[in-house]
Amino acid sequence: MTRICFVFITVAVFIQTVAGQSEETDWLQHVIPNKERSFDFKTVAKGAIPEYQFVLKNPLQEPIHIVSVTPSCTCTTVVFDREKTVLQTYEKFEIAVKLQGDAFEGQRNSTLTVVIDQPNRAEIQLNIRGEIRSDLKISPADFIDFGNVAPEKGASRTLTVSYTGSNTQWRIVDVRCDNEFIHADIANDFSNIGQRKFNITVSLDKSAPNGNLRTLLFLITNDGATRREIPISIKATVGTVINVTPSPLFFGALPPGKPSPQKNVVLRGTMPFRILKIECDNPAVEISWTMDAQASPKGMHLIPISYRNPIEGEGAPKDDGTMLAVIRVTTDIPGVSPEFYATMSVQKKESEE
């Protein structure tokens, strides 16, 4: 008899605040809405390790500090950037959750708890659902990782799905992926005594743009409606990628005419690089960087940035009290020039509130 496993990560929110429960509920809804706190992996093959990313955002002017992200069961593994647990305004925090279909069978429950202590104490629990089936196996056992792919080169991988259940008519009938740059074909299927195997060729299109690609490919079977889809996690890094943190850069809510404190922007690349030029469309944004023609390429660069915040004139906030600037970084890598935004708002006077 086929053994199955249902994995649940349930949702709850607990808040301690002086501002009122309804206000805090609204705040957490902007960090991650209820509708984004759950994901259904549906059918998970034995040996597969599908992955899903939850994304938290900071909608506040104050930083959000994430204390911990903890699963209650070893059937789920959590991956996140442990050096980036303080989210400035508009920054995002990605939590990758892996369901360990290689090591578990049977019914299990797990809770992933995100603990926040700033600006208010809060706990957010995220919801994952999946059914691990021992009659299905996937090789290679992990997700498909194309690794670093050169621009306009594309890539291809083949995986094998084996079915050992009692349904002699069981088949993979289709494939589906929401990412237009991922294609998959059922290369062939063959049967042995008590086993059916299907080879699936998964390709990354040559036209895929530079950047980090994270998506799920679903194999569609002729099982019942609740068990039809088998997810396969897919990763790739196309070309050279430079990540900017924080992005956007928020100077805060500043009093009229008061300059911002200096803030650091970190640029990290998938390969060492040199910065040739930094430009900004707002002259009141000051970038403490000087071109060094003798500098060696580095994998990480630290750029101090501040805002003079003039009351009027060139670079001053708009009539609504906001400022948005575009900063462009030119590197020595052809075609790689990351852009990011800097923003601020004018602090209201008490009489205006």
Image: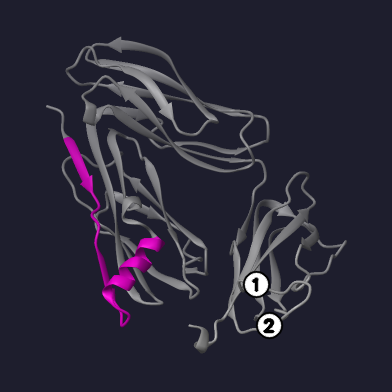
Residue 140 falls in image quadrant: top left
| Element on which disc 2 rests | loop
The N terminus - image quarter: top left
Question: Considering depth in this image, is 89 or 49 the residue closer to the camera?
Answer: 89
| Element on which disc 1 rests | loop
10 part of magenta stretch: yes
Task: Check the image and report above or below for 279 versus 146.
Answer: below
Question: Considering depth in this image, is 162 or 230 the residue closer to the camera?
Answer: 230
Mark 2 and mark 1 lie on one chain; the one further toward the N terminus is 2
Residue 335 falls in image quadrant: top right
Q: Position of residue 148 (x, y in %)?
A: 60, 40
Q: Position of residue 56 (x, y in %)?
A: 42, 59
Mark-to-mark CA distance, 2 and 1: 18 Å
Give the residue displayed 22% in from the left and 45% down from the top.
7
Q: Position of residue 290 (x, y in %)?
A: 83, 69
Does 189 sit left or right of 57 as displayed?
Answer: left
Q: Tell me the kind of residue under disc 2.
A: Pro
- Disc sitting over residue 319 in the figure: 1
Residue 206 in view: yes
Residue 318 falls in image quadrant: bottom right
Residue positioned most to the bottom:
351
Give the residue displayed 47% in from the left and 71% down from the top.
60
Q: Tell me the kind of residue under disc 1.
A: Asp
Does 145 sit left or right of 246 as displayed?
Answer: left
Foreground disc of the pair 2, 1: 1
Which residues are the magenta region? 4-31
Disc 2: which residue? 259
Give the residue displayed 27% in from the left and 21% down from the top.
163
